[in-house]
Image (cartoon, grey):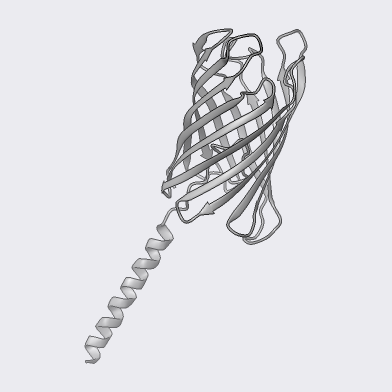
Amino acid sequence: MRAAGRSVVAVCAALALEASVAVAEEPTRIQTDRPSVSNSTSTVLPGALQIEGGVDYSVSRVSGGSDERQFQLGAMLRAGLTDRLEVRLDGAPLVRLRGAEDDTGFGDPTLSLKYRFLDVREGSWWPSLGLLPFVKLPIARAPIGSERVDFGVTALASVDLTWQLGLDANVGLAAIGQSNGDAFRLHEVVSAALSRQIGERWSTYVEVFYSSPSERGAHDIVGLDAGIQFFLTPRLALDAAAETSFGGPGPDYAFRAGVSVRLGR
């Protein structure tokens, strides 16, 4: 009986150890920066590569002219360097314009870094803080691209709230290259996205954003955005979103859908 008892204890201990190892090896759930306008302070795990891509269709009504329609296939690569730092390459391999000017080509790539310089304890009401400096490389030809370099930095803040809510807020300042002879024009972007977890696989958000004129003669843009994410696995997520904006030259309405996957850790 004692031998049998020792055997049962040994089996239970082995199962407990195996379960603890399985829990330890369970991958953390992917955290994406799409489909919302706002970016969170979360960074990709060091040694991991995250791919976020999708399609974007937008329509802008033009007074006295035909509607301007844009279809875009976008992709972003995010590579974790440290626990708080990642490097990113964002681009559009395919852009198709239809309207006053018709064109098909690729968009300008953007190279950026995301650095989270302040972490907070879980459950704290204080936000984590980060910075996102970026530079847009003028590779695409007009009218798809501006043929001018842009650069800037975005301040990031993320906080976990009660009732499975989370808030991401961004304030950005950029120097936008101008094609009319001016060197650069200062451009401000402010956004805030309120998200909520629904069970283990779903997440929704609503968002408001503001963008100052990026060129002479343009108007301020105020927009609303809402979307949903579904997590197929801890490493794979699907998303969809709808957007509307007021002013110009933002789209009157836009739809986005995509997929995000994390490779490595």
Taking the view exactly as shown, the residue that stands out farthest to the bottom is 1
Does 258 sit above or below residue 135?
below
Picture quadrant where residue 132 is located = top right
Given residues 216 and 118, the one toward you in this image is 216
Q: Position of residue 45 (x, y in %)?
A: 52, 47
Q: For the image shown, how many numbered marks are present on the structure?
A: 0
Point out the image quarter for the N terminus.
bottom left
Does 238 sit above or below residue 252?
below
Name the residue rendered at 57%, 15% in the picture: 68
Q: Would residue 29 be found to the left or right of residue 39 on screen?
A: left
Given residues 101 and 233, the one toward you in this image is 101
Given residues 262 and 168, the one toward you in this image is 168
Name the residue rendered at 64%, 35% in the picture: 224
Q: Position of residue 2 (x, y in %)?
A: 24, 91
Taking the view exactly as shown, the residue that stands out farthest to the front is 64
Picture quadrant where residue 250 is located = top right
Given residues 31 and 130, the one toward you in this image is 31
Name the residue rendered at 51%, 31% in the picture: 256
Q: Would residue 3 be found to the left or right of residue 79 on screen?
A: left
Q: Position of residue 162 (x, y in %)?
A: 63, 60
Q: Position of residue 139 (x, y in %)?
A: 57, 15
